[in-house]
Image: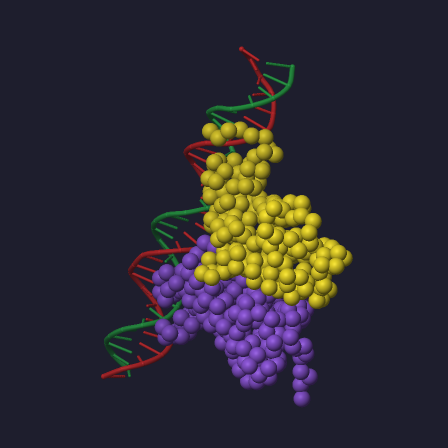
Chain colours: A yellow, B purple, C green, D red
DNA sequence: CAGCTAGTTGAATCGAGATTCAAATACCGA
DNA sequence: TCGGTATTTGAATCTCGATTCAACTAGCTG
């Protein structure tokens, strides 16, 4: 028998298991047994904690987005130079590679959002939060005089998030000539025009 | 009994039915019976024409992409002024609204492409074709001296297609403040920087 | 108009996955 | 150590969609 765990702990495990299962089998094509197997449990145990599977899936998506967003905030947290910060922000929004679990899950949702209000809201909220994040970076840079914004910060921020999203899909689909580094360069080409800053990656200390 | 049709005609019907069914129930969550119902047939008849359901789904996606691309080419075909052509090209890449069937289907594939090589190839190919399309517009404008390209045409074209893609997803997810018109404006803001052209929509005759 | 063929139906069967639940068991507190 | 309880199992059952196929029929052909 699988190790017994407290309700709270097990629910966290299950969210993680659902995450993995959805990446393998699709956000909508995933089966209860697949989630149970990922968690090292039987289907009955999963139902014990989540009588309604949909609730688990939504929580898994929600947790995945929080994780994605928190990780980005953490990566850019320590950086003070606006140009460097913008570059790091861009990089942190792209998948590491075609198998990046966090981004894979986000991509799963794009289509479902057209049919499912909850998923649509989750994705829209994430988009808007990322836009705000970029706006902060852009306006700080403008206040310091290192960015000369070609448009209002919201417009630029939206376009940056949009580019990230789209190139994320390309990387996940294994585009032969768009890997994460290439994607960063493409987005930076826009960012340079929009900020008037050359945005050269700093060579380490 | 449903009207009898030739093999070829019926297959076209079924591709259309699969298209509609996938939009309602998801590219991967769709069921044989749902496709049969959309086509006004029974499941047996569908299997008669497509013993392997996957083949039908792939053909439906393929046809949807062809249609999407052909429609764009047709819309921009008659326009000769490069600036106007670019604006129309951008507009033609976005959904009419959240219920646009063509784009809905494309969005369904994004997630699946991470797991399915065939879908990944279809999407990648479409992306590259759209990039070529934009490159032609951009280079023609540059040759006429009305565009001053800030980067090579491939970079700009890729970014334009990426922006379209991403805002397509936003529209489909019913973002409260990004409708098709707003999306066009956002993309145009980038296009102006990249081409050095004010890109003002011509007021019709 | 008779016969043939291809397309379609509908009922039967099959199988996979969801759901239920009594029994088993690990862990906790007394 | 000994209940008591929360968690997990595993088998039984239920449900639904896929698959098969013999019978049926529309439309063509001679």
Residue shown at the point (62%, 74%) measured from the top left: B195
Q: What is the residue that sits farthest to the right in this orientation?
A: A143
- Nearer to me, A31 or B184: B184
- Nearer to me, A93 or B122: A93
- How many numbered marks have been drawn onto this rendered protein structure? 0
- Nearer to me, B21 or A203: A203
Q: Residue C26, relative to residue B123: is it above or below?
A: above
Q: Quadrant of residue A146?
A: bottom right
Q: Is residue B199 left or right of residue D9?
A: right
Place of residue A34 in the rendered image (x, y in percent of width and height, measured from the top left):
47, 43
- Nearer to me, A158 or A6: A158
Residue shown at the point (72%, 56%) measured from the top left: A141
Place of residue D7 in the rendered image (x, y in percent of width and height, measured from the top left):
55, 31
Q: Residue D4, relative to residue B32: is it above or below?
A: above
Q: Quadrant of residue B97?
A: bottom right
Residue shown at the point (67%, 89%) measured from the top left: B205
Q: Report whether residue A41 is seen.
A: yes
Q: What is the residue that sits farthest to the front in this orientation?
A: A205
Q: Report whether residue B137 is seen.
A: no
Place of residue B15 in the rendered image (x, y in percent of width and height, measured from the top left):
44, 68
Q: Residue B149, relative to residue A178: is it above or below?
A: below
Place of residue A74 in the rendered image (x, y in percent of width and height, measured from the top left):
64, 45
Residue shown at the point (67%, 61%) measured from the top left: A197
């Amino acid at each position: 028998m699988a190790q017994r765990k407290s309700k709270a702990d097990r629910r966290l495990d299950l969210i993680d298991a659902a995450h993995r299962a959805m990446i393998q089998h699709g956000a909508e094509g995933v089966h209860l047994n697949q989630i149970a197997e990922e968690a090292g449990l039987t289907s009955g145990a999963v139902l014990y904690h989540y009588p309604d599977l949909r609730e688990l899936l939504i929580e898994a998506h929600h947790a995945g987005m929080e994780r994605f967003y928190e990780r980005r905030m953490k990566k850019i947290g320590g950086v003070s130079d606006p140009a460097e910060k913008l570059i790091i922000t861009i990089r942190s929004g792209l998948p590491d590679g075609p198998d990046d679990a966090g981004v894979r899950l986000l991509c799963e949702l794009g289509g479902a959002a057209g049919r499912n209000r909850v998923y649509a809201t989750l994705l829209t909220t994430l988009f808007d939060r990322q836009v705000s994040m970029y706006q902060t970076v852009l306006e700080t840079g403008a206040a310091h005089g290192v960015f000369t914004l070609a448009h209002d910060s919201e417009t630029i921020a939206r376009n940056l998030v949009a580019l990230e999203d789209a190139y994320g899909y390309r990387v996940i689909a294994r585009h032969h000539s768009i890997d994460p580094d290439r994607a960063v360069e493409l987005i930076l080409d826009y960012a340079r025009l929009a900020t008037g800053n050359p945005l050269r990656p700093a060579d380490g200390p």
